[in-house]
């Protein structure tokens, strides 16, 4: 499901009764699963069929090395931490685990687990009446599970992301055929909500719009959201630091949109609590190194510009950034010069949010195939993000469709002490 059901979103805010602060998270998903041993965990002592073609370079943190194709990020290593021992992934090409910290299927409640953006919409509500709390920038892709910006699950479509890159794009923010003089016309008002392309909620959770229409109009008629999405309003020097991307989709993956790194910063600065981004395509079963030579410099520029921008604007203590894919890649390079799926271990990068940075957490064995030190579950990262957002995962719950309280992470998942 997608779209934004404003009346329910606003109702949830009014009912939450929980302290609101403008903490935020930017989640950058790398569709397809990047090869950890060629980016953040190079194995120079491994045999050639495992070692790969890239060399490590030193960073601003003594002893920390990353690939030679990330020189800008190397200079900012003191501003992020690398986890080299992510475990618990499944061999599935989807974004769910990176958006919820959980898997689909099994013990999930009816409606499914909500993603972090939907949880923040429900628990924290809006920072500003004219800004949705959750914005998903991932566009449609040939492989649709990669284009998942995050589902609201049992929280209902009122907490789904606003998705300006899907449907008719930014036209979704325009009242269809309704000018400001006609906003007093109730029939025209209700009809205009159709341009948000909301999915009809068959469960009946979306009861009337009356009590919250006035607040909903704050978003619909404000230019705040539209301006945040317009990188043309950015300082030209800052805009140039992010570089320029390619809006075309990469095969069945995401486009290389450098602008999305900048838009994510503009959105959280304007009041969004969560922004999800998908960048390029990393499923390199063949010609892995040729593809990485093209994409790593782009990721380097966009992500390093984002970290510098957040720091310069004093947002680095409040805005958490996480970068990862759904799994890692095989230690052995295949006959096509690629690496295949490897859910047994992968990497992640975390920055901002007041977290302890400038460190490497965990390690893999000599071949990069198994976590040899401090295996980290996806749920632990989510517990950490919630903690940095001011939410106690040991106490805060959200009600499922039956009214039963559900914790935000699986039992036993606690904030990572290394990042506190």
Image (cartoon, grey):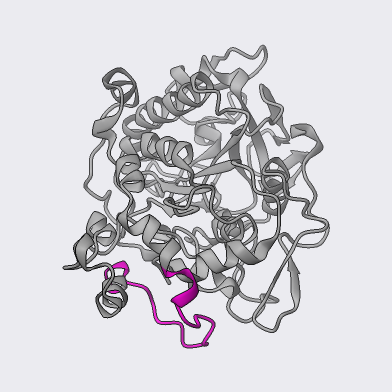
Horizontal and vertical percent position of residue 28: 48, 43
- Quadrant of image for the C terminus: top right
Image position of 266 (left or right of 360): left
Task: Give me the residue at 64% from left, 14% from top.
Answer: 61
Please tell me which residue lies in front, 200 or 326: 200
Q: Give yes or no for residue 211 being in the magenta stretch.
A: yes
Question: Which residue is situated farthest in the left direction here?
Answer: 177
Task: Give me the residue at 68% from left, 30% from top.
Answer: 354
Which secondary structure is most common in the magenta stretch? loop
Horizontal and vertical percent position of residue 326: 53, 53
Please tell me which residue lies in front, 279 or 153: 153
Which range is magenta? 194-213
**Quadrant assignment, res 375:** top right
Image position of 321 (left or right of 292): right
Horizontal and vertical percent position of residue 49: 50, 36
Q: Is residue 90 visible?
A: no
- Residue 310 higher or lower than 245, as above or below: above
- Residue 408 higher or lower than 414, as above or below: below
Task: Give me the residue at 39% from left, 30% from top.
Answer: 302
- Quadrant of image for the N terminus: bottom left
Q: Is residue 24 visible?
A: yes
- Residue 200 higher or lower than 138, as above or below: below
């Amino acid at each position: 499901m997608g779209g934004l059901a404003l009346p329910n979103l606003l109702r949830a805010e009014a009912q939450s009764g929980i302290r609101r602060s403008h903490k935020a998270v930017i989640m950058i998903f790398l569709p397809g699963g990047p090869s950890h041993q060629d980016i953040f965990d190079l194995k120079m002592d491994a045999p050639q069929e495992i070692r790969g073609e890239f060399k490590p370079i030193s960073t601003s943190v003594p002893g920390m090395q990353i690939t030679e194709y990330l020189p800008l990020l190397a200079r900012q290593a003191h501003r992020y931490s690398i986890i080299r021992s992510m475990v618990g992934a499944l061999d599935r090409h989807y974004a769910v685990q990176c958006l919820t910290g959980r898997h689909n299927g099994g013990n999930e409640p009816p409606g499914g687990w909500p993603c972090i953006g939907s949880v923040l919409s429900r628990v924290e509500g809006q920072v500003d009446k004219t800004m949705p709390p959750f914005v998903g920038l991932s566009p449609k892709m040939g492989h649709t599970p990669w284009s998942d910006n995050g589902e609201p699950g049992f929280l209902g479509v009122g907490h789904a992301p606003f998705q300006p890159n899907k449907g008719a794009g930014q036209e979704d923010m325009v009242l269809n055929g309704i000018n400001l003089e006609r906003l007093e016309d109730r029939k025209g008002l209700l009809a205009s909500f159709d341009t948000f392309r909301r999915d009809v909620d068959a469960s009946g959770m979306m009861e009337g719009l009356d009590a919250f229409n006035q607040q909903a109009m704050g978003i619909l008629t404000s230019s705040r959201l539209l301006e945040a999405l317009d990188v043309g309003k950015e300082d030209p020097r800052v805009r140039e630091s992010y570089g320029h991307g390619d809006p075309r989709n990469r095969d069945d993956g995401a486009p290389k949109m450098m602008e999305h790194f900048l838009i994510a910063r503009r959105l959280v600065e304007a009041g969004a609590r969560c922004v999800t981004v998908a960048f390029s395509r990393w499923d390199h079963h063949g010609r892995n190194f040729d593809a990485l030579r093209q994409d790593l410099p782009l990721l380097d520029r966009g992500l390093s510009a984002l970290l510098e921008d957040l720091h310069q604007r004093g947002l680095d203590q409040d805005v958490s950034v996480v970068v990862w894919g759904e799994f890692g890649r095989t230690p052995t390079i295949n006959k096509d010069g690629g690496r295949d799926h490897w859910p047994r271990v992968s990497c992640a990068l975390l920055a901002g949010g007041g977290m302890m940075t400038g460190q490497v957490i965990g390690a893999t064995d000599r071949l990069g195939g198994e976590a040899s030190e401090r295996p980290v579950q996806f749920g632990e990262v989510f517990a950490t993000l919630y903690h940095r957002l001011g939410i106690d995962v040991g106490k805060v719950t959200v009600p499922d469709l039956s009214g039963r309280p559900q914790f935000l992470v699986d039992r036993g998942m606690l904030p990572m002490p290394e990042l506190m």
